[in-house]
Image (tube, rainbow, N blue to C red):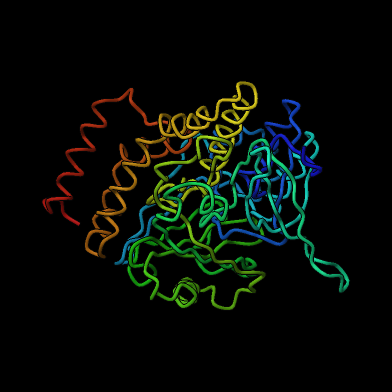
Amino acid sequence: MSALETFEVVVVGGGPTGATAASDLAKKGRKVLLLDRMGRIKPCGGAIPPRLIKDFEIPDELLVAKANCARMIAPSDKAVDMHIEGGFVGMVDRDKFDEFLRVRAANDGAERRTGVFEKLTRDQDGVSVVHYLVRGKHGAPDETVSVRAKAVIGADGAKSVVGRQAIPGAKDVEYVFAYHEIVKVPENPPAGFDGSRCDVFYQGALSPDFYGWIFPHGTTMSIGTGTADKGFSLRSAVTALKKQTGLEDAEMLRHEGAPLPMKPLKKWDNGRDVVLAGDAAGVVAPASGEGIYYGMYGGRVAAEAVEELLVTGNGKVLAKARKRFMKEHGTVFLVLGIMQRFWYTNDKRRERFVKMCEDKDVQRLTFESYMNKKLVRRDPMAHLKIFLKDTAHLLGFAKV
């Protein structure tokens, strides 16, 4: 028998995905280690829908703003406002939001440690061994710590090290690279600024294949963009966006950049004792870039699969995490992927896309689906109207 400390579950990554998985398993009485790197903040607009707030019991004090409108801005600068009737989208700062979730996981019984995941091996009993690096303090040398794990959840983000070591095909992921700056709202904001509105810029100069954004965060805001084009300067685009909107002199508090996966991996587990979740599994929504809700839901279904593994000892049950996720959200990911590949191709199509967003049926069904995380099926005539209008735009019959 190994003398190493043994956990029932080691969760690698303490973002919303990992913290949710750790919390759920700890509440079931499992011995859980939540391992996270210090100082990691993901570039993110910070939007969370009501479904997330309800399902994951997010307190109102974490919401730094409540957006009730999304403004879509075309290459011509034509703007379409999409108002949220009778609701709002919550906005959070990821540094405070993620820390709240980690603290909650610890309060639920998970053991929280800071370290950098290095590798997975197996001991003589065939049990996974997680090796992680602890940085030395006050001049002390770094130390590698090893613990045994009956199950491992890789929630260590895009380009997951856990995934690359344990899951076939985990390296084959399409990425959008995102960059944003958190800036202070000026004492005298520029004309037209609205702290309850999310501005989304569909302009090739700001992103050749994604979009730029300005999202309200109360006394601050997130200004960012993303692209899969490695030769495109994201920082220059954000600088241009700030100048374009009169925010070039806004005080920057911090900035972050990171890759965002745009397509779920075909396999999330090794059939034995390792399963991926969140960005590590590729579940950032195409077209919108939304990841917080899908990450937390992915953490939850991963935790459910791991719980079943611990009860049954059958590693095949880990595949249920992906099956449950794709059954619930696979169609949305497919539709959004098609939409991004077509509408984000050039400015002519972006112009038509924003024009299409003027339609009230499009707005209503879009927000109902976004807020509740389910495709709206009860209004077939509205879907038919949208299909016909969409076809007209695709064929160029609709006027811009």
* Residue 11 location (% of width, % of height): 66, 43
Residue 350, located in which quarter of the rendered image? bottom left
Q: Residue at x 18, y 50 (%)?
A: 393
* Residue 39 location (% of width, % of height): 71, 62
387 left or right of 379?
left
Q: Residue at x 47, y 71 (%)?
A: 245
Foreground of the two, 192 or 367: 367
In the image, residue 13 sits, relative to residue 274, either above or below, namely below
Q: Residue at x 23, y 55 (%)?
A: 352
Q: Quadrant of the C terminus?
A: bottom left
In the image, residue 94 sits, relative to residue 323, either above or below, namely below
Foreground of the two, 55 or 104: 104
* Residue 211 location (% of width, % of height): 40, 61
Foreground of the two, 153 or 110: 153
112 left or right of 221?
right
Foreground of the two, 195 or 351: 351
216 left or right of 343?
right
